Image: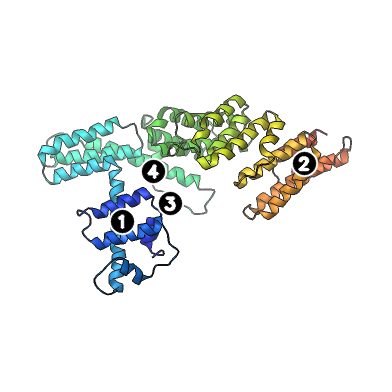
Amino acid sequence: MRQTKLFQALQQLPKTEHNRFKKYLGSPYFNVNETQTRLAHLIIQEIQNPTSKSWEKEQIWDALRLDFPYDDVRFRKYFSDLLKNLENFLALRQFEDHEESRRLFLLEAVEQRKLSVLYNSSLRVIRDHFQKSPFRNSDFYYGNFMLEKRFYDLAGFEHNRTAQSNWEEISRNLDYFYIAEKLWIFCNVLARKDLSSHEYKLELMSEIVNYVEHNQLQDIPPIAIYYQVLNLYRFPEEQQHYHQLKGLLDQYGMNFPKEEASDLYSLAQNYCIHQLNRGNALFLSELFVLYQSVLERRIIFRDDQLSPWDFRNIVVVGLRVGDYDWTLKFIEQYLQFLPPENRENARSFNLAQVYFYQKKYDQVVELLRFVEYEDISYNLNSKDMLLRVYYDTDEWDPLYSLFESFRTYLNRNKDIPERNKEAYKNLIGFTKKLTRLHRGDAQKIDRLKSEIQSCTNVANQKWLLEKVEEF
């Protein structure tokens, strides 16, 4: 049973969906086969309260309380029919969550059934829904395209060809939707150009870009934004496209569903990171402002929670721009939005980072000395931080003890990629060599500096070179 597609699909659904599916099967409008209901209850019970036994087909058949002997063809059909019921249930749930689709299908239904008494009210409700919607993404224009098509049918323009119809509205909304979606496709293909050797054949790219450039479409949010994103990939050296994109995100960011807005801000953030990697330090403050924007607008949240990785990235950027007070307030204010199981680790590690930047080394040691994080990234970075603290404070005994424990941790942990292990082992090795240098020994100092510079895989290479320069 556990190997069936039906069991595995139900297993991935949350308990709330299990309960709704059972209610769905209990409705005679959707299901009149009691065997289907009993089979669903049996599978869901096994998912929610798993037993150690492996259910054989005959045992399942007996549990269904059927009045005839086991029949393999029927048994398979029960599973197949229940899977179809599950698929119909999922489609219905998706339909229920999309008011625009429901309203558009209602318009189609009243038109096909000639329910003229419902024409005006149905049309008014969906027009009002679109007008009040805060969103202006490409789906908005597709919805309006479908609405205008339904209105064309309801108004009977097909049978009254002398009347002025709404063909312009139909065409305009379709154009906006199509142009926006094509631009988004172009953006995604260019974004993956360096990651894939596959050459995509994209029709009408130059024609659509040319059309956008020669028509005033700045007030159509998805077209205006996707066009600037496209320009980031086409002309990465021309920074004005980033600044134009940032301005458009400030203007239209809240006109997109949260997940879509988050993706758009991520594109702008990635451009800043790319510029930083190329040595353009001015983009650090740009990245900081973008993070502040998605926090204030709550675009970065998912189900009212903040990802531990986003939390940590924001802390790092805040520290790198030197705004320690803001970063401390951020940790205090937003810690509660992390998943409960991540909060304590995030608190101790990120506070330690703040104290490290403030050179409050005693507080760093107090937070990290006896902590072993379950998360590998936290563990590696905390040991890295302690290593630098011990070195900068001339705590040689704890430093040499850490050399050994850190190296042992790297050797024993099989979940750390080999390249990462090598980078941290090189950090340990070079730091150990630093402790043996003496001022005035120019030959050894130059040799170590050359070794560090030529090493292509070492953690905190910049810090190591700064320490060499201190001799």
Query: Along the polypeptide, which appears first: circle 1 or circle 2?
Result: 1
- Which badge, 1 or 3, is on the more N-terminal residue? 1
Sequence-first disc among 4 and 2: 4
Place residue 447 in its image quadrant.
top right
Residue 47 is situated, as x and y percent measured from the top left of the image, at 40, 57
In the image, 87 versus 453, the foreground residue is 87
In the picture provided, is 372 more to the left or to the right than 107?
right
Secondary structure of the residue carrying numbered label 1: helix
What is the number of the mark on residue 86? 1
SS class, disc 4: helix
Q: Which residue is mark 4?
A: 182
Residue displayed at 49% across by 54% down: 198
Please state the horizontal and vertical placement of residue 335, each as a whole percent of the image.
53, 34
Q: CA distance from mark 4 to mark 3?
A: 13 Å
Q: Residue 399, labelled with which disc?
A: 2
The secondary element bearing badge 2 is classed as helix
Foreground residue, 6 or 66?
66
- Locate the C terminus by quadrant: top right
Q: Earlier in the sequence, mark 4 or mark 3?
A: 4
- x then y, percent, for residue 362: 72, 32
Dot 3 crowding, Cα within 10 Å, few <14, some 14–19, many 20+: few
Position of residue 87 relative to residue 153, above or below, is: below
Label located before the other in sequence (4 or 1): 1
Badge 1: how crowded within 10 Å, few (<14), some, or many (20+)?
A: many
Residue type for callout 1: Leu
Q: Name the image quarter holding the N terminus.
A: bottom left
User: Considering depth in this image, is 59 or 85 the residue closer to the camera?
Assistant: 59
- Residues under labels 1 and 3: Cα distance? 38 Å
